[in-house]
Amino acid sequence: MPVPVPRQRAIPAVECGQAPAASPDSGPSKEQAAPGTHPADNPTTRRENTTDAHDRPAGRRGSTIPTNLTLLLIEDDPAGSPLVPDLIDQTGKPIRVRTARNLTEAERLLTDDVHCILLDLALSAPAPARPNADTDGDGDGDGHDELAVLRHVLELAPRHAVLALTSSSDAERGAEAVAVGAQDYLFRDELDGRLLSRAIRYAVERKRSDSAERRLAEGRLRAQENRRLERGLLPTPLLAGSSLRFAARYRPGRSRALLGGDFYDVVRTPDGTVHAMIGDVCGHGPDEAALGVELRIAWRALTLAGLCGDELLGTLQQVLEHERADDEIFATLCAVDISPDGRRAGLCLAGHPSPLVAAPGRPARLLPYDNNGPALGLLPGARWPRMQVDLGAEWSLMLYTDGLIEGHVGGGRERLGQDGMVEMVRRQLAAGLQGEQLLRATVNEVRELNGGELADDVAVVLLDRTAEAARSR
């Protein structure tokens, strides 16, 4: 239950440092500390009694020192007996005390500047919502809950430190109060100013520590759940029965995210054709990441259903148009289908950079991109021609998103571009890198050239057909 917002009230002069403190049992005090007297030499605990808080006159400004801590005392008759002695915090400043006779007054006085609540467990409990109901099972046989008032205060003030006050003959009740949620308990008949001041400070710090630890634990749980969810949304290639080797690298542009707007997938259909796809939804937020996952799943389902080329991309565009949050959102995509013998491939480009292919004895190069169609979601009724390309017996095919080529080179405005990426991959292949090592080195060098993390998402997929695989056909 959130802390209720109290009604606006006039702040008494005694709280503003403009008037001397009032004695809890004798009305407004006529004595003031001598000029220059340190509060530690003449400690005065400033109290606010609910009966005269609005009527106290303003005195001379600066007659008292502002306090650091505020205590809300809740007991049946706070003005009848001086239960709370003079209190001084660790800096020698008086601790301000507000008093309430019941929970209704406590709710009104429970403002954000209250640091700690001192609750007398002997206070009359609020009337239960249902007679003879023991909701927590901690009361006696007739449904009476001895800690009902404490539970009500904890529900009323979940962010405040709470000290329970009980008699020395009822230590068990104090221990139960701590188990329910109080920071500590004190004995009413052994109370003194030094003990209470220290208990207030400890309770406030313990509450802050517990709250910080709880927020940290909740944050860790949310982060773990998000990581598990995002990992589950990344694809698991379906290449059973294929001789092709697969590798991939993925780096989202969002800070502390595992999934961005880039997406990829690889599947092998029953006829032996290997289908590979990589795409990029414009934008970098969680909505774009979710749309990328939807497009990837739709692509896999349509591919396994037998669709290919222009028919598949047209259906994907329909999915995008139905699922996107804004009509201006689009996605680029590169789709490749490799024949069962591994020597040929069909290529469809929807506003996406052309893949890179490398083979022994031939330098790395880009596949043709003259028939590149528009990005998905831009033109209703668009078409995407399928180009046939020869790969040869042994090759490496790299699909990537534009995050790999749009990073800067050095401190200037020049970007790496496709030509720079091709030269980089050529050097790394000449150095003998392949598979995961090749992709890791490529992404790391792009980051180094950019001078740090890339602003855009990066996804790279590598398919290799080795000489051993070619001989086995």
Image (cartoon, helix red, strand yellow):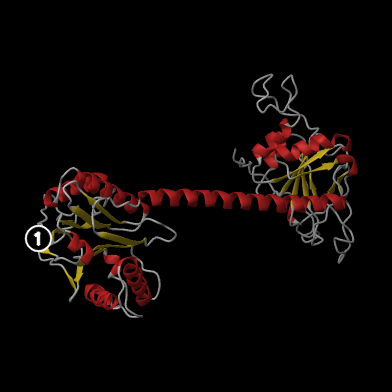
Count numbered badges in the picture.
Answer: 1
Q: Is residue 443 above or below residue 59?
A: below
- Measured as percent of width and height from the top left, residue 216 is found at 58, 53
Could one spot residue 466 in this view of the protein?
no
Closer to us: 368 or 186: 368
- Measured as percent of width and height from the top left, residue 96 is found at 77, 51
Q: Is residue 373 above or below residue 434?
A: above
Q: Is residue 57 above or below residue 148?
A: below
- Amino acid type for the residue under numbered disc 1: Gln
Q: Quadrant of residue 417?
A: bottom left
Q: Which residue is labeled 1 in the image?
A: 388
10 Å neighbourhood of mark 1: few (<14), some, or many (≥20)? some
Closer to us: 274 or 35: 274
Task: Please state if 138 lies on the left or on the right of 275 as rendered.
Answer: right
Q: Residue at x 49, y 51 (%)?
A: 224
- Measured as percent of width and height from the top left, residue 376 is found at 19, 54
Could one spot residue 180 in this view of the protein?
yes
Q: Residue at x 24, y 59 (%)?
A: 244
Task: Please state if 215 lies on the left or on the right of 399 as rendered.
Answer: right
Quadrant containing the C terminus in the rendered view = bottom left
Task: Please state if 141 lies on the left or on the right of 429 as rendered.
Answer: right
**Element type at mark 1:** strand
- Measured as percent of width and height from the top left, residue 429 is found at 27, 75
Quadrant containing the N terminus in the rendered view = top right
Q: Quadrant of residue 358?
A: bottom left
Q: Residue at x 65, y 38 (%)?
A: 156
